[in-house]
Amino acid sequence: MTRAARPGRPALRRAQREALMGVLFAAPFALGMLLVVIVPLLGVMGISLTQWSLLDAPRWVGLRNYTRLAADPAFLRSAGVTAAFTAGILALNISAALALATLLNVRLRGIGVFRTIVFSPVVMPVVAWALVWKFLLQPDSLLNTWLSRLGAGEVNLLFTPSTALWTVVVIEVIKSVGLNAVIFLSALQGVPPELHEAARLDGATGWQVFRRIILPLISPTFFLVFIVTLIGALKLFTPVYVLTGGGPADSTTTLIVYMFKQGFQFFEFGYASAVATVLFVIVLALTVAQWSLRRRLVFYEG
Amino acid sequence: MRAERAPRWSWALYALLVLVSLPFLLPLLWLLVSAFKTSAAIFSSPFDVNLAHLSLANVRQVFHDYPFARQYVNSVYIAALVVPLTMLLSALAGYAFARLRFPGRDVVFILTLVAMMVPSELTAVPQFVAFSRLGLTNSHVPVIVTQIFSATGALAVFLMRQHFITLPPELDDAGRVDGLGTLGVFRYIMLPLSRPALATVAIFAVLNSWNDYFNPLIYLSREGLLTLPLALQRFTDPLGGVYWNLTLAAGVLVALPVLLTFLLAQRQFIESLAASGTKG
């Protein structure tokens, strides 16, 4: 400090002042993030090695929570539910978003109104949206009655174990697909129109143009949307919890709902932390895998 | 796309667009109408949109029989703290990561990327332990703090850093030649150029704060402390049966400010969200 502060070394002094300002600028967020996210993240891993109800002292149990998880049918089931739920949301959301973006990209008078309509559920409060659908799907509700009149037999979409999960998936996708659609739309609008026309003149079909020209050009966006949607689906709690509370018969108990129940309903905080750690490792692994795939799959212009 | 063919096919396209719009629009319209019907009418005449049959009775009852006004104030003041603080902290940190060299910068930035990836639900157990040791359960402190430093907060820092990187460094130098310090450059040159990025951050922060359900669920149990997402589920009889007329009326009151803001500012809204997705 004193050496650098000596006159005659202005470059060093400026570097020091810059470092000081950098620390001061970053510190308010960085300290909060360390305390609220990073330390608790390590804490989760630590607590997962204990048995703890918060009322007594935590008892060290080593990896026992993890061996218990591996043999816990309810946990394995929730892992399966999460896989199906995430795959369902990913497939439906991305294909619907691409289709909507293509449709909303047409040049028509008043197209902006339709863009607004498709996007509007995105800003709708999550709980309000879930409650509207919960009402629409009440036993004996209109939607269920219509479906049974169409010949589907006795229908109770949200309260039947075999249909509840897919019903939640569809409700969630209608809620949030507008965001991905708008992101794809702005990527599509960045594709130079001469490229389509040139390919068309060369005799390419619509599908070929999409597959060979548009998809590679929007691949960075596609990639980003894919990761964000995937991680979003893995951690999705509110709509599931409000719509079904994890039921019926645990058919919609995803890992995050399972973690919540173990921790905040059964006070098994060590066990809940083990679930959280597993979920974190999955998220981390997916992200790392995505990043390494990125170079091979994503086409960057220039 | 193929604008020359549009006129011939436009009727078919409009039909398709209307059909596609239904699942997005109908639940909203249905909510708006049902909220002003009696409990019986919601079930018996769901398609009755005669304005003369609608009344404000539900809204009155929501405010009269429940601490809904209080809960509304809670949500509003929490957002009023979370949103500007997120904007300020993310702009400061984003600028530091983009422009200033300081020891530990890369480590802290990598930790920010990790924080962006960690769903806040996953760290709930140790957070809960810490906040309850501090005697802060059943207060708004944990709700506010977890919102500011959540994955959304980290995303905000990331977006601001990306934004500042795109601004030419010559701007900073020009400011310094004019005698501004780092704080001056930030305040008088960088911030005024950051409106679109800050707007995006504000949008994410508003939605994050207004919708947060998990943390209030864990930390808040007293009725008067609840925020709106939890309050929406409290219109029930003692057996847990839902008073749908009140729930839907309250749902409209919760959705209205966000929906109106969106309708008024939708271009900026959609553009800034789209930009944050395409820049990657």
Image (tube, grey):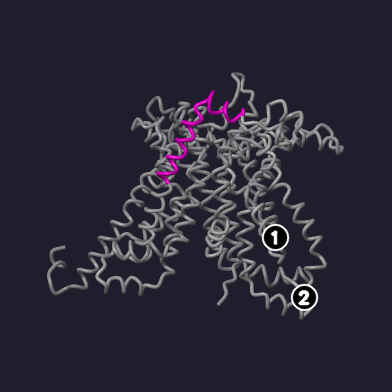
Quick one: SS at disc 1? loop
The span picked out in magenta is B57-82
| Disc 1: which residue | A110
- Total marks placed: 2
Q: Looking at the picture, how far across and down is residue B20, in whole percent?
A: 74, 52
How crowded pointer 2 is (Cα within 10 Å; few <14, some 14-19, many 20+) is rated as some
The reply to the same-chain question for discs 2 and 1 is yes
Task: Give the distance between the C-alpha atoms of the residues marked 2 and 1, in whole angstroms.
Answer: 30 Å
Extreme residue in the right direction: A151
Where's residue A154, x and y in %? 82, 31
Residue farthest top in this picture: B238
Occupied quadrant, residue A131: top right
Q: Is residue B1 left or right of residue A59?
A: right
Residue picked out by circle 2: A204
SS assignment for the magenta stretch, majority: helix
Q: Outermost residue, front direction?
A: B52
Q: Is residue B71 magenta?
A: yes
Name which residue lies at 64% across and 33% down. A244
- Reply yes or no: does residue A289 show up in magenta: no
The residue type indicated by label 2 comes to Ala
Which amino acid type is shown beneath numbered disc 1? Gly
User: Quick check: marks 2 and 1 in contact, CB under 8 Å?
Assistant: no
The location of residue A164, given as percent across then percent down, is 70, 37
- The reply, left or right, for residue B19 in relation to residue A125 is right
Q: In the rendered structure, which disc, 2 or 1, sits on the residue that comes first in sequence?
A: 1
Provide residue A147's location: percent of width, then percent of height. 81, 38
